[in-house]
Every structure is written in structure tokens, then in C-alpha cells.
């Protein structure tokens, strides 16, 4: 069922990478024919849980990068505890796709540098509000035109909602913290990140509230 105003992505998460096959690839490609499906993903590498073998993860990730390139769509990338392989794959294939979004970014300097080299978007989640967050430099060093904010709902609820189910509305907390770290007004940060999202994913994401054009 379609819900007005909502968009989607289509892909195979690294946890399910072992299920990747030609039929799955074809199903994702068919889904991308729908304008409501704005990107491939999330896909990538997760060596923390290793719920699919690492070779399968790399194979499915490379295949989805190629699919995104062929279909002219952005790709939303998940990366956890796989910095070396992720950096190498971004360097090898990241320039072939229209845009790479490093989703809920929390990787190390190797992936940050690889993302910067290919002009990736860096999307920051509720983790930026956590007391143990130690990566403020990524928020401040991220180029203005490559900064995104997100929630990763239903996980990673920002302070003061930790332990609760995360909700899309909590993105305001994420944006406020990112603005604070960058030393800029929240309104300016919100406008820029919204414009970046529209540039990345298409005009479908442009805010249509007549009071906030």
C-alpha cells in the first residue's frame, strides 16, 4: 500500500546478504521503477554480528552498488566494524553511483576519509546525543552540502528518549545536537540538511507544507 508523502528504499541488508541471488536483484530493480523508491539499500557490511558470512556480505554489497549505478539511484550504506573492507569498496565502486549515503555514521577515520574522497553524504543519528559519543569532529568536518540527519528508528533513540522506541519526530533532537556541535542556528542546519536530502534523493522529498516552502 502507498502512503502519500512517504518514500522508501529497496535493498538487502548485510545481515541477510547470504540470501542474495539473481531473483532478489531483479525484484529490487523492479521496485526501483516506482518513483516512491528513491534509493538502493540499506546495504553494506556488518562484521559486528556476522549474521551472513563476510564473503557473502561483500558480494551482495558490490552487486547492489552496481545495481545502483546501473539504475542511476543513490545507495544507503550500513557499516559496522568493517572499516578496512568498507573503505576499500567505497574507493573502488563509490564513484560509480549517483550518491553514497553513509547511514547512521559511526565508523572510524578510514571510512570517513573514503567517504570524503568520493563526495559521500554523512548521515548522523541519535548517537550524536549520547554521552559516550566521541566523534564530534566528523560532524564539524563534514562538508555543509554533504550533511544529513536521521533517526534510524526504531533504534538509537536520542537523549532524553534512550531506552524508548525511536520515532521519526525525534530527528529534531538529532538536528539540535548537530547544530550545537557545528555552532550554528538550528533553523539553518534544518534547512541545509533538508536541501541536501532533496538533492540526494530527488525532489520527491521536498517539503510541501505551504507554510514552510
Image: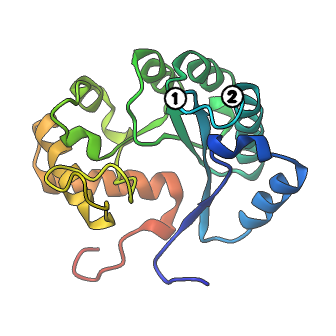
The residue located at (81%, 62%) in the rendering is 27
Of the numbered discs in the image, which one, if any, rests on residue 48?
Answer: 1
Q: Can you identify the residue that label 2 sits on?
A: 93
Camera-nearest residue between 61 and 97 = 61
Q: How many marks?
A: 2
Which element type, helix, strand or loop, lies under badge 2? Answer: helix
Q: In which image quadrant can residue 33 be found?
A: bottom right
Viewed as shown, does residue 126 lie left or right of 50? left
Q: Quadrant of the C terminus?
A: bottom left
Residue lying farthest to the right in this orientation: 22
Q: Is residue 170 above or below residue 141?
A: below
Viewed as shown, does residue 190 lie left or right of 2? left
Q: Where does residue 138 sit, x and y in percent of width and height?
A: 30, 27
Q: Where does residue 42 sit, x and y in percent of width and height?
A: 58, 48
Q: Where does residue 48 sit, x and y in percent of width and height?
A: 52, 29
Gap between marks 2 and 1 measured at Cα:
23 Å
Q: Quadrant of the N terminus?
A: bottom right
Q: Where does residue 168 sit, x and y in percent of width and height?
A: 33, 65
Amino acid at each position: 500500500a502507498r502512503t502519500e508523502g512517504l518514500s522508501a528504499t529497496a535493498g538487502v541488508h548485510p545481515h541477510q546478504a547470504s540470501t542474495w541471488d539473481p531473483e532478489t536483484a531483479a525484484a529490487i530493480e523492479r521496485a526501483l521503477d516506482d518513483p516512491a523508491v528513491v534509493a538502493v539499500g540499506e546495504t553494506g557490511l556488518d562484521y559486528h554480528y556476522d549474521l551472513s558470512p563476510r564473503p557473502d556480505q561483500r558480494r551482495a554489497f558490490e552487486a547492489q552498488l552496481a545495481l545502483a549505478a546501473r539504475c542511476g539511484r543513490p545507495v544507503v550504506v550500513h557499516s559496522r566494524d568493517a572499516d578496512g573492507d568498507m573503505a576499500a569498496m567505497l574507493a573502488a565502486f563509490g564513484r560509480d553511483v549517483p550518491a553514497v549515503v553513509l547511514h547512521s555514521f559511526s565508523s572510524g577515520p578510514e571510512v570517513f576519509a573514503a567517504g570524503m574522497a568520493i563526495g559521500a553524504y554523512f548521515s548522523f543519528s541519535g548517537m550524536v546525543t549520547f554521552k559516550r559519543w566521541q566523534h564530534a569532529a566528523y560532524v564539524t568536518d563534514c562538508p555543509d552540502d554533504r550533511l544529513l540527519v536521521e533517526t534510524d528508528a526504531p533504534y538509537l533513540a536520542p537523549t532524553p528518549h534512550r531506552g524508548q522506541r525511536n520515532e521519526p519526530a525525534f530527528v529534531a533532537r538529532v538536528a539540535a545536537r548537530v547544530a550545537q556541535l557545528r555552532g550554528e542556528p538550528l533553523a539553518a542546519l534544518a534547512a541545509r540538511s533538508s536541501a541536501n536530502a532533496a538533492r540526494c534523493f530527488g525532489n520527491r522529498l521536498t517539503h510541501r507544507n505551504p507554510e514552510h516552502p
